[in-house]
Image (cartoon, rainbow, N blue to C red):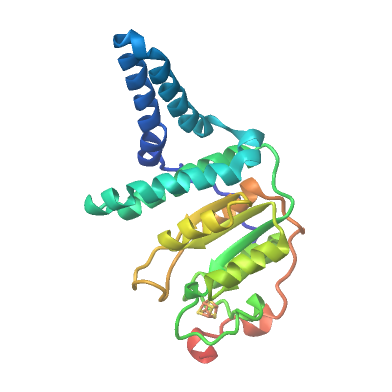
Amino acid sequence: MEAMVPNAMPAERYGMFLWVRRGVPLALMLGFLSVGLLMPHGFGWWALAAMAMGGVAWPTFKQGEAYLQARRAIIRWDGMWVWLFRPLARMMGQEDAWILSFCGWNNRRVREAFEGRKAKRSLILLPHCIQLAKCKAPILDDLEKCYDCGLCPVGDYMHGILENGWESRITNRSHKAYREAREYRPDLIVAISCTDRLLKGLIKLSEVPAYVIPLTLPHGMCVDTQFNVPHLMAAMQTLAEPKLGPRPIEGQTGQTGQSAESAA
Ligand code: SF4
């Protein structure tokens, strides 16, 4: 197989989250200042309230190294805003869009931080539901046991991983993914999962910068899920250093052409 050509990363979509996360405190700040100017006797208190709102908005302006250093607190604050406005988003039928907008904002800031200096110790986390449900290839034990039959994204993913030597884990439980990540101590995580688990993962592992990509669920939750392999490869090529030059995939000659049915 030819080496994969780097792809452009898609633009992040984060307008909804940023308008709320930055816009609400800034609007309140201006409102408090205006009220203070209209009521000169109590100006000090209104000015204090306006400064507090400025402080709430301030972390949204941090970029690069300053963002990475403050990331843990920033994610906790941002997570609180996601949680606060989630019921409203649900009522408006925008719950997924709201969470994905937060994920897009997170991705934008991680991209800014790593585009200049790539991660040296990156880790990819994927859920087991990307494997075709009827396939019995034991990819949880060894990714190279995939027969590359083309019926699910695992084969293409395996080629990309082996060509670049990137560390990756496919797990069937979120807590195992968190444990694997903490044991490996990466400086960047690239994670793929459903919307809700991406949100939980970002907050649980707030100490590690994470670029996240949502699954698509053509057959519902946790069954034969799909993801955009070129998007993942583009993210890794942009944000992380490869660990190896291209290398041949062991055992592929004998295994190519076996189908998922023959593996089942
Ligand atoms: S053998 Fe086919 S169905 Fe099974 S994991 Fe590999 S690509 Fe997916």
Q: Position of residue 200 (x, y in %)?
A: 48, 59
54 versus 253 height, above or below: above
Query: Who's the residue at 39% across and 26% down the image?
Result: 26
128 versus 119 height, above or below: below
The quarter of the picture where residue 233 lies is bottom right
In this view of the protein, can residue 165 be seen by the observer? no
Q: Position of residue 42 (x, y in %)?
A: 36, 14
68 versus 26 height, above or below: below
- Left or right: 193 in relation to 157: left
Screen quadrant of the N terminus: bottom right
Taking depth in this image into account, of 224 and 110 the one nearest to the observer is 110
Q: Residue furthest left?
A: 92
- Left or right: 7 in relation to 188: left
147 versus 220 height, above or below: below
Q: Position of residue 32 (x, y in %)?
A: 35, 21
Query: Who's the residue at 46% across and 27% down the image?
Result: 52
